Image (spheres, rainbow, N blue to C red):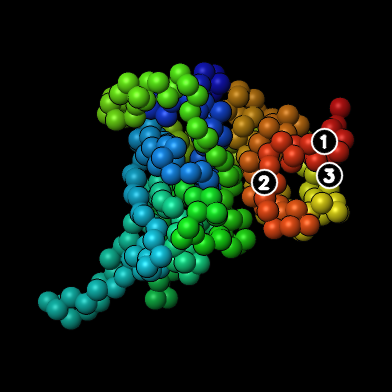
C-alpha cells in the first residue's frame, strides 16, 4: 500500500527534520504532484535542511544557490564562455541544471534574477541565446523566503508566486523536538545516517500513477465552485486562475494517491486548499496575505457535495 510507503518516507525525513510531520507530508505531496515548493519562515527554522533531506531521501541530484541582491540571471542559468583553444563559445550550465534546486532566500534577489526561474519552473527547460535546453526529470524547485518585514527583501512578483504549487511554513519546533536539537540529536548525524528512500525510476512511476488518479464530475464541480467563489467574493482582490485550478487538482490527486486511493474526495481538496491557494489570494482591502485559519473559514461558505 502506498499509504505505508508514504508514512515510511515521512518517518525517515522526520528523523532529521524534527517535529514537522505535517509539513513533511505537504512537501512530499508537492513533489510527487510535479509542483514546486515555497517555504516561508524566519532564518534558522530548518528550511534548508528540509530541502536537503528531501533530495537525499529521493536519491536525486541536489544544487543549492544563495540568492543575494547582486545575483545575475546567468549565475543561475549558466553562461557562454569563450574557449581560446577552439575559438568558440561553449555553454557552461548553471546550478539550475539539476533535479532538486534550492533557491535559498529567494526574495533577497532582485525581481530580474527571480524571473530567471520562470521558464524552468513552468516548462522544465532553459532558453539561452536562442537555444532551448531541457532540464532533468524529475525537476523540483524548493525556494525559501524570509518574511517581507525583514531588511533586504524584495516582494516576489505574482507571476513568480503562481509558479509555486504550495507555500508552507515550518514554525518553531515544539519543546520535545527542540530539546533533542539542543542535546545534539539534530540534523547532522541523522542526515549522515539517512538512507535513500527510493530509486529515481520509482519517483517517476509514482508521479505517473498520480496523473491517472480519477476525479469525478462531482469533485470537479466542487473545485469549480471554489474557484468561482474566489472570483465573485468581495473579500478578494482577484480570484484564482485556471492555472491555480489545475494546481489544486494535481495536489488533490497526489494527496489521495499517497493516502492509498485511486480517486479524489472533497476532503483531499479541503486539506491541501490553504497551502495551494493561500499565496495566490489577497484581501481586497489591503495587500496582506490571508492567515490559514481565516482562509479555511472563508471557504466553508462553499457547499460540499454529498
Residue at mark 3 = 225
Separation (CA) of disc 2 from disc 3: 17 Å
Residue at point 56%, 61% (across, down): 155
In the figure, is residue 176 to the left or right of 184? Answer: right
Residue at mark 1 = 300
Q: Mark 3: few, some, or many residues within 10 Å (few <14, many ≥20)?
A: some
Determine whether 122 is above or below 172 in the image: below
Instruction: Indicate the position of residue 182 as horizontal and vertical percent values.
Output: 35, 24
Q: Mark 2: few, some, or many residues within 10 Å (few <14, many ≥20)?
A: some
The N terminus sits in image quarter? top right
Question: Which-is-in-front pick, marks 2 and 3?
Answer: 2
Instruction: Indicate the position of residue 249 as horizontal and vertical percent values.
Output: 68, 42
Q: Are marks 1 and 3 in contact (CB under 8 Å)?
A: no
- Mark 1 and mark 2 lie on one chain; the one further toward the N terminus is 2
What's the mark number on residue 39?
Answer: none
Separation (CA) of disc 1 from disc 2: 15 Å
- Mark 2 and mark 3 lie on one chain; the one further toward the N terminus is 3
Residue at mark 2 = 278
Instruction: Indicate the position of residue 8 as horizontal and vertical percent values.
Output: 46, 20
Amino acid at each position: 500500500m502506498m499509504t505505508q510507503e508514504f508514512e515510511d518516507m515521512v518517518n525517515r525525513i522526520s528523523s532529521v527534520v524534527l517535529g514537522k510531520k505535517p509539513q513533511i507530508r505537504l512537501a512530499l505531496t508537492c513533489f510527487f504532484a510535479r509542483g514546486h515548493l515555497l517555504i516561508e519562515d524566519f532564518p534558522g527554522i530548518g528550511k534548508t535542511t528540509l530541502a536537503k533531506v528531501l533530495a537525499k531521501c529521493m536519491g536525486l541530484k541536489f544544487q543549492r544557490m544563495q540568492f543575494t541582491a547582486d545575483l545575475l540571471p546567468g549565475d543561475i542559468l549558466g553562461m557562454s564562455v569563450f574557449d581560446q583553444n577552439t575559438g568558440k563559445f561553449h555553454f557552461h550550465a548553471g546550478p539550475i541544471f539539476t533535479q532538486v534546486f534550492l533557491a535559498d532566500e529567494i526574495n533577497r534577489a532582485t525581481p530580474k534574477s527571480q524571473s530567471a526561474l520562470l521558464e524552468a519552473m513552468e516548462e522544465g527547460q532553459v532558453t539561452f541565446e536562442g537555444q532551448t535546453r531541457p532540464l532533468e526529470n524529475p525537476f523540483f524547485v524548493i525556494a525559501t523566503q524570509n518574511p517581507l518585514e525583514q531588511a533586504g527583501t524584495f516582494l516576489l512578483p505574482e507571476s513568480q508566486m503562481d509558479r509555486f504549487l504550495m507555500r508552507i511554513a515550518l514554525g518553531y519546533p515544539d519543546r520535545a523536538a527542540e530539546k533533542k536539537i539542543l542535546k545534539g540529536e539534530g540534523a547532522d548525524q541523522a542526515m549522515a545516517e539517512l538512507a535513500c528512500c527510493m530509486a529515481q525510476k520509482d519517483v517517476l512511476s509514482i508521479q505517473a500513477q498520480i496523473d491517472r488518479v480519477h476525479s469525478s464530475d462531482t469533485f470537479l464541480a466542487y473545485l469549480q465552485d471554489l474557484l468561482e467563489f474566489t472570483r465573485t467574493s468581495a473579500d478578494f482582490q482577484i480570484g484564482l486562475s485556471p492555472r491555480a485550478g489545475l494546481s489544486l487538482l494535481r495536489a488533490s490527486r497526489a494527496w489521495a494517491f499517497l493516502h492509498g486511493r485511486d480517486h479524489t474526495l472533497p476532503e483531499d481538496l479541503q486539506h491541501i486548499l490553504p497551502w495551494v491557494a493561500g499565496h495566490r489570494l489577497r484581501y481586497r482591502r489591503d495587500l496582506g496575505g490571508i492567515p490559514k485559519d481565516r482562509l479555511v473559514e472563508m471557504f466553508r461558505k462553499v457547499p460540499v457535495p454529498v
